[in-house]
Image (cartoon, rainbow, N blue to C red):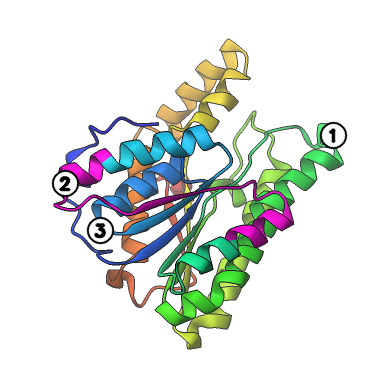
Amino acid sequence: MQNADTPSSIHATPRLLEGKHAVITGGSEGIGFGIAQAFVHAGASLILIGRSHHKLEAARHELMSIGQTSHDQPPSIHLLEADLQHPEQVQHVADTVLARWPHVDVLVNNAGIGRFAAFADTDEALFDQHINLNVKAPYFLTQRLLPALISAQGNVINISSYFAHRMLPGRTTTAYSMTKGAVNAFTRALAFEVGHLGVRVNAIAPGSVETPQLQHNLQAMPVEGQQAFHNMVRTIYPLQRIGRIEDVGQAAVFLASATAGWITGTVLAVDGGLTTN
């Protein structure tokens, strides 16, 4: 988790989401927390969903301190502990959100899993984990919150990945890549289906971003593999660095706001130029 001393670009964010209600899955760390930070600065009220009570509380504490520093009133941040790999938990989350907010302006489907196992070593349990969390959870949570999104004329932001269509040497990602390809297809198809109802649906496809999950994946590599990864970043990223969580957060604020009011069905690459080559 980043500390509260975020770059000045976040502090300068206009309050594009003033008075909006946003639900963020996987919002306690990594990219989800970066989006939560940016949304607080933009004026949104939040429901953060995560599996760890401790991480959720830590995230709320940090977000409250950020919000009180930048605004006159403390931000409204609610926590919901749930494991979205389980269908009954998806229903529980939807019921809890709707009991609090009959109108949802923004749903960010960020919670996900990425285990880079070789195709030959991917068993059915690992495959199902990817399908359940990366595909089924966003599909059915969005479905159950759709009436509240229609009521608010809101929008959905799905978190995809460049791995949907760009592979890297030494990183075996068949299950993960397949699910992120499904997220992209879901984004476009749902945008087509619900546009006439006033709901926009977009996705963000980040490049490699400095998150606990990335660190976990790197630490699982041998030292030579870690060095090769850092050398590769300097070679294949035109901006010669991996992303920061605030890079994705700022993009999410834009897509969630009225500034992007004529944008739907888009998968926005936020990847430092990785997919230009």
| 219 displayed left or right of 60 | right
Residue 222: horizontal and vertical position, in percent? 62, 13
Q: Residue at x 31, y 42 (%)?
A: 63
Q: Residue at x 49, y 88 (%)?
A: 196
Please tell me how crowded label 1 is: few (under 14), some (14-19), or many (20+) other residues with Cα within 10 Å: few
Q: Nearer the viewer, residue 234 or 204?
A: 204
For mark 3, what is the residue? 43
For mark 1, what is the residue? 120
Q: Secondary structure at mark 2?
A: helix
Q: Residue at x 44, y 49 (%)?
A: 276
Mark 1–mark 2 Cα distance, whole angstroms, equals: 50 Å
User: Quick check: 144 above or below 91?
Assistant: below
| 213 displayed left or right of 19 | right
User: Quick check: 139 above or below 50?
Assistant: below
Callout 2 touching callout 3 (CB < 8 Å): no
For mark 2, what is the residue? 70
Q: Which range of residues does the magenta coloring cover?
A: 65-93
Q: Is residue 71 magenta?
A: yes
Query: Which residue sits furthest bottom?
Result: 196
